[in-house]
Amino acid sequence: MKINKILMLAFLFFVTQLTTAQTELQEITSTLMDYIEGTANGEPDRVKKAFHPDLNLYTVAGDSLRVWHGQNYTGGIKKGRISNRIGRIVAIDYENNAASAKIEILMPDAKRRYTDYLLLLKYQGSWKIIHKSYTFVKYPDE
């Protein structure tokens, strides 16, 4: 009888952890999709919802590190202006209230493929992108 109780408690713990993990992954994915779809569909409020207000974007241009404040980035998104951006989530990794994600954005008009590396934190009940580092490669001319 004692073994049955232990097995039942272990099973309940496993199910609770699995359910929590699925929920966290869904919440992280939702935040990432707010960023991806918000930038593609001209929805600056949706992007602001995904980004922490103090977010900065980082990239390297030549030998220089460029830093771009997230508010300037979201300020450049024109409401209702749809752009030819095709985004997808490549990977998500998380533990407790910290996560990282890799995003790929294809921009056929510019003949570029951007790769974003994002850091997220969950606080006050929601996931926010707190950091974005990115790079791009050009498509070959046809």
Image (spheres, rainbow, N blue to C red):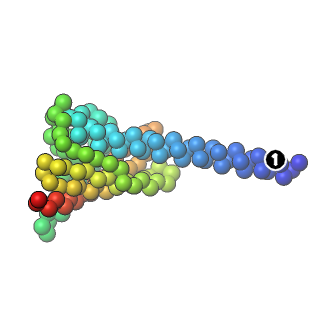
Check the image and report above or below for 98 versus 63.
Answer: above
Report x, y in % for residue 46. Answer: 29, 35
Residue at (30, 42) in percent of width and height: 35
Residue at (34, 41) in percent of width and height: 33
User: Badge 1: few (under 14), some or many (20 or more) residues near its Cα, within 10 Å?
Assistant: few
The front one of 78 and 86 is 86
Report x, y in % for residue 117. Answer: 31, 56
Check the image and report above or below for 102 versus 74.
Answer: below
Q: Secondary structure at mark 1?
A: helix
Q: Going by the picture, which residue comes out furthest to the bottom?
A: 63
Residue type at numbered disc 1 = Lys
Q: Going by the picture, which residue comes out furthest to the top?
A: 80
Residue pointed to by mark 1? 5
Count of number-bearing discs: 1
Residue at (36, 54) in percent of width and height: 90
User: Can residue 96 be seen at all in this image of the molecule?
Assistant: yes
Q: Going by the picture, which residue comes out furthest to the right?
A: 1
- In the image, 52: left or right of 123? left
